[in-house]
Amino acid sequence: MPDTDDRAPDPMHTRILDVASELFYELGYRGTSVDAIADRLAVAKPVIYTHFKGKADILAGVCGRTTAFAAGAAEAHARQTGPATPRLAAMVRELTLRVIEGRVYLAVYFREEMHLPADAYRKLSSNRRRFDRALSSLLQQGVDAGEFVIAHVSVTTQAITGMTTWLFNWYRPDGPLTPAQMADDMARLALTMVSARPLES
Amino acid sequence: MPDTDDRAPDPMHTRILDVASELFYELGYRGTSVDAIADRLAVAKPVIYTHFKGKADILAGVCGRTTAFAAGAAEAHARQTGPATPRLAAMVRELTLRVIEGRVYLAVYFREEMHLPADAYRKLSSNRRRFDRALSSLLQQGVDAGEFVIAHVSVTTQAITGMTTWLFNWYRPDGPLTPAQMADDMARLALTMVSARPLES
C-alpha cells in the first residue's frame, strides 16, 4: 500500500509498517514487542522511535494506510464528472488491487482494531465514513443519470465494499487469477450488481 | 445462531456461548477469564466446565456456530433439485439473517481465530471449504442450466460470501432496514450479480 496518510513516504517508515504488520499478523499485537520489530528489521530500537511514538502508534500506522487510501480514492472518483459507470469500475478495480496488496495490513486491522489509541480509532472511523459517503455518492450519481438501477444505495455501497474487502481473507497469490484479472472481475461484478450497461474499455 | 454443530442445543450451552462471545468482543479473548464468564452468567465456575473443557473450547464453540450453519445451509440448497435461482436467493437470504443475528460471534471469530486449538481450527477451515464448494456448485448448476452468467465461479462465490459476511461489520439494529428487508436486498443483489432472471416470489 502506498503511503497516503499525513506522513511523508519515508522508506524506513514503510519498512517498519511492513515488518510490524507481518509480526502482528503472525504473533498478534499483544504478542509482538517493539524489540521484535527492531530485530526483524535488523535496526536498533531507537530507529523505530524516530518514526513512531510506540507500538500503538505503529498499529495506528498499519491500520490507517488502507482506510486512508480507500477514502481518498473513492472521493477522487466521486468528485469527477462524466458517466458514473467507468468511474465505479475504476474505483472497484483500484480498491481490489490495494486490498490484495495490503491484505496483511487489513487482516491486522480487523483483528487488532480494539487496541488502537482513541484518536487513531476516531480517525480510521472517519476514513471509513468518508469512503462510504463517497461510494454512496458515486452510486447515487449513477442512479440519477439513469445508468444504475439500485434498490437501496446504502446496502449496495456495503455489498461492494464487502465483496472487495473480503479478498483480504481468501486471496492466495498462487490462485488461478492474477491481481489484475481479479480486479477486472470485481469491477465487472460491481457493474452487473448495479445493472450498469456493459462497459466499453 | 442456532446450534448446528455436533452438540445438543442445551440452553445453558447456548447461554455460555452468548455471554462468552459478548465478553470476547468487549475485552478480547486474552482479556476474558472463565471466571468473568461465570460471573456474568451468575453461575458457579464448575457449571461452565460441565459444558466446555476450558476457554479455548468455548472460543471454538463461538467460532464454530456460524461456519457450521453456513456450510450446512449451503450444502442443503446445493443438493436440492430444480431451478438454481430460487435456491441461490433462499441461501443468501438465510445466510444474511444468520450473519445479522450472529454478528458478535463472527466479529469474535475473525479477531480471535489465531487463538483456536489446532483441531478446532482445522474443523472450521473444513466448514469454510464445504461452504465454498457448495455455493460454487450451486452457481455452476445455474450456469449449466443457462440461468446464470458468471465469468469466474470461484470469484463470484467469494464475492457473494464477502458481501453477506461483511454485514457483521456494518449492520446496525437501528438502521432503516429490518433484517428481513436486508436479506431480501442481499438476495436480489446476488441474483443481479449472476445475471439471473428476475425472481417471481
Image (cartoon, coloured by chain):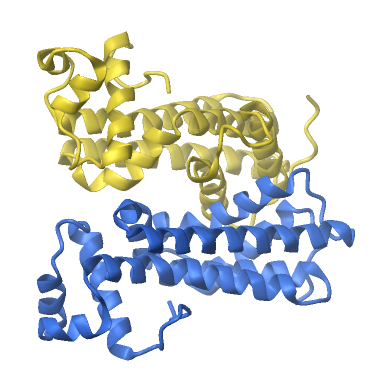
Chain colours: A blue, B yellow
- Residue drawn at x 66%, y 59% is A133
Q: Is residue B46 above or below residue B143?
A: above
Q: Is residue A95 above or below residue B33?
A: below
Observer-nearest residue: A126 or A102? A126
Whether residue B194 can be seen here:
no
- Residue drawn at x 53%, y 32% is B95
Along the horizontal axis of the image, is A186 left or right of B73? right
Q: Quadrant of residue B105?
A: top left
Observer-nearest residue: A154 or A107? A154
Instruction: Report the label total.
Output: 0
Whether residue B98 can be seen here:
yes
Q: Quadrant of the C terminus of chain B?
A: top right
- Residue drawn at x 47%, y 29% is B75
- Residue drawn at x 60%, y 33% is B174
Q: Quadrant of residue A7?
A: bottom left
Q: Position of residue B135 (x, y in %)?
A: 52, 39
Q: Quadrant of residue B54?
A: top left
Q: Position of residue B63 (x, y in %)?
A: 31, 34
Q: Is residue A95 above or below residue A38?
A: above
Observer-nearest residue: A80 or A96? A80
Q: Is residue A40 above or below residue A198?
A: below
Q: Position of residue B200 (x, y in %)?
A: 81, 28
Along the horizontal axis of the image, is B22 left or right of A149? left
Along the horizontal axis of the image, is A170 left or right of B13? right
Q: Quadrant of the N terminus of chain B?
A: top left
Q: Position of residue A84 (x, y in %)?
A: 79, 68
